[in-house]
Image: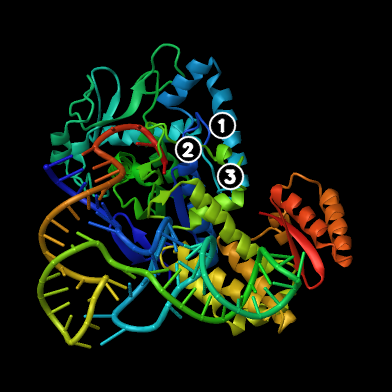
Amino acid sequence: MLKIYNSLSKRKEKFHPISAEKVGIYVCGMTVYDYCHMGHARVLVMFDVITRHLRRHFPQVQYVRNITDIDDKIIQRAIENNEDIYALTERFIEAMHEDERALGILPPDAEPRATQAIEQMFYMIKSLLEKGIAYQGNNGDVYYSVRKFKNYGKLSGKNIDDLEAGARVNIEVGKKDPLDFVLWKMAKAGEPSWESPWGEGRPGWHIECSAMSGTHLGKHFDIHGGGMDLAFPHHENEIAQSEGANDCAFVNTWMHVGFVNINDEKMSKSLGNFFTIRTVLKNYDGETLRYFILSSHYRSPLNFSAENLDSAKSSLTRLYTATRGLSASESAMQEVAQRFDFETRMMAALNDDFNTPIALSILFELAKTINSTREKDASKANALGQLLKKLGSFIGILQLDADDFLKQGATLSTEQIEAKIAQRNSARDNKDFSTADKIRDELSEMSIILEDNSGVTTWRLK
RNA sequence: GGCUGGGUAGCAAAGCGGUUAUGCAGGGGCCUGCAAAGCCUUAUAGACCGGUUCGACUCCGGUCCCAGCCUCCA
C-alpha cells in the first residue's frame, strides 16, 4: 500500500488514484533561461524515482512536466544576450535534456511548453472573467481576484489577512487588491506577445500550469508536484485558477521536494549560491549525483558539499563492488528473490512516502549478503548480484556494468594500466616487492587502486 | 508579526514507545609478501527542562536554537 505525504492535508495518506487504470501526475518544470542547478536536479531525480515507483503499481501513468518558455526573466536574458528568445529557450531546453540524461532520468510522457498552450489559457481566463473571479484592470492587465476564491490559502496554510499585513506584496496600478495576481499582461514594445481578447499581451506565470495540466490530465487529477518554494504562491494560485474556473477539485495529492542547501542556506538563484548540474558533473559522475540526492528523504533539506558528494561516491562504489564479476539468469535471480525478503522490503520502503534512505540501506544489506556468500556459494551470490541490480533499477542506480563504473575517469589508458600491472606482477613473481610497491604507488598517485584477488590483479579508480 | 519544518553518534542519514538502522570515517581481528577489496568485531547518539509510562530518541507541555515560506525562485 503506497502512502504519500500530502502537502495539502499535511499528513501521510494512503494513495488512491482517481482511476486505477490511469494515474496522472503533473510536475512544475524549469523556466529555461539558464542551466539547471542542483535544486532542479533534486526535483528531476525525485520525480523520476516517484514516477518509476508509480509505474510499478499502476498500469498506466501519465507524467507531465512542463517547460516555462515565456516569462520576464527569459525576456530579460534574451535582451542581455542579444539573442533571439526562441534560440535562447531552445538552447537551455537542450542543455536540460543533456543534464537529465547524465542523471539517469527517464523523459516524462509529455513536456508541454507554455508558448504552445496559449489557446487553453484563453479558455480559462475567459471562464474566470465570466464568473467574475477575474477582472481587467485599468492598465489592461487581467487579474485574478483572490478574495473571490473562498479557499485561498488552503495549501500554504496562509490566510489572506495575514498576507496583507505582511505588506511585502507588490502594489501594481491595475490591481484592485494588492494580493491579486496577473493572468494576462499587456505587452510592452518589443516583447513577444500574442493577440488576445484583452489585447496584445502575454500570459502571467501561474495560468500556464492550470491550462497545461488540464489539457493533459483533465480538470481533476492525482498528483501535482514541484519544489517547496512553489507551494506559495504558484501552486496556491493554480488551485485558485483551476478550481475557480472548473468548479471541481483540482488535485488530490500535492508533493513538494525540499531544498538543496549550501552551508545550511537555501541554494537559490537570487542568493547566487548555486551550482549548476554541469559544473558538478565536471568532478563527479551523474550517478554519484543521483545517489547523493537519494541519500536523504525528499522532504528533508539536502546539504550540498564536496564531503557529502565524496561520501556518496564511496557508498556507490561499495554497491558496485558487490556486483562486480557477477551475472545470473533471470530465473536464478527470481528464485533467489523469493527466498529473501529484500524486494519486499525495498517496495515497503518506497511505499512509505518514497523513503530512499531506507531503500539504500536495504541495498547495502543485500551487498553485504552477496559479499559474505561469494566464497561459499557462487551461484547464490551471482543470483543475489542480479537482484541487487534489479532493486537498484527501482531507484535508477546500479545499471552500469560494475567495471564501467569503477574504472571511469582514469588518466591512463586501459592498455597502459594493464602494462603496469604486468610489470608489477612479474616483479612480485621475483619477490622484488620494492619495485612492485613502487609501481602500485605510482598508479595510486593517479588515483588508480590495485586489488589482488585470488591471484588476479584488478584495478579501479579511487 | 503570521505560517511551515527541523534539532540523532566524528560526518551523512532513517525507522521505532522496550530488540543491530545504513553508509563514510575510527579501533581490534581474519585474509594479504605488504596493501586494497571483502569478512568478523567494536566504540561514539538523540538540543535543554519537565510530564505521561513498568519503560521514551520515539508521545505530551515548555525553553533555546536553526532553516524555509509570507517577493521571482525547484
Q: CA distance from mark 2 to mark 1?
A: 10 Å
Q: Quadrant of the N terminus of chain A?
A: bottom left
Camera-side mark, 3 or 2: 3
Counting from the top left corner in percent of width and height, residue B36 is at 66, 63
- Of pointers 2 and 1, the one earlier in the residue sequence: 2
Q: CA distance from mark 3 to mark 2?
A: 12 Å
Q: Which residue is mark 3?
A: A100
Circle 3 Cα neighbour tier, 10 Å, few/some/many (<14 / 14–19 / ≥20): many
Q: Which residue is mark 2?
A: A30
Q: Quadrant of the C terminus of chain A?
A: bottom right
Please say if the residues under marks 1 and 3 sit with CB atoms less than 8 Å apart. Answer: no
Where disc 3 sits, the SS reads helix
| Residue A401 as seen in the image, left or right of residue A243 | right
Where disc 1 sits, the SS reads helix
Please say if the residues under marks 3 and 2 sit with CB atoms less than 8 Å apart. Answer: no
Counting from the top left corner in percent of width and height, residue A75 is at 45, 21
Color theme of the render = rainbow
For residue A202, above or below residue A82: below
Counting from the top left corner in percent of width and height, residue A250 is at 34, 50
- Of pointers 3 and 2, the one earlier in the residue sequence: 2
Q: Amino acid at mark 3?
A: Glu
Q: Which residue is mark 1?
A: A92
Q: CA distance from mark 1 to mark 3?
A: 12 Å
Mark 1 on the same chain as mark 3: yes
- Of pointers 1 and 3, the one earlier in the residue sequence: 1
| Residue A398: quarter of image | bottom right
Mark 2 on the same chain as mark 1: yes
Q: Amino acid at mark 2?
A: Met
Where disc 2 sits, the SS reads loop
Task: Tell me what residue is drawn at x 46 percent, y 48 percent.
Answer: A43
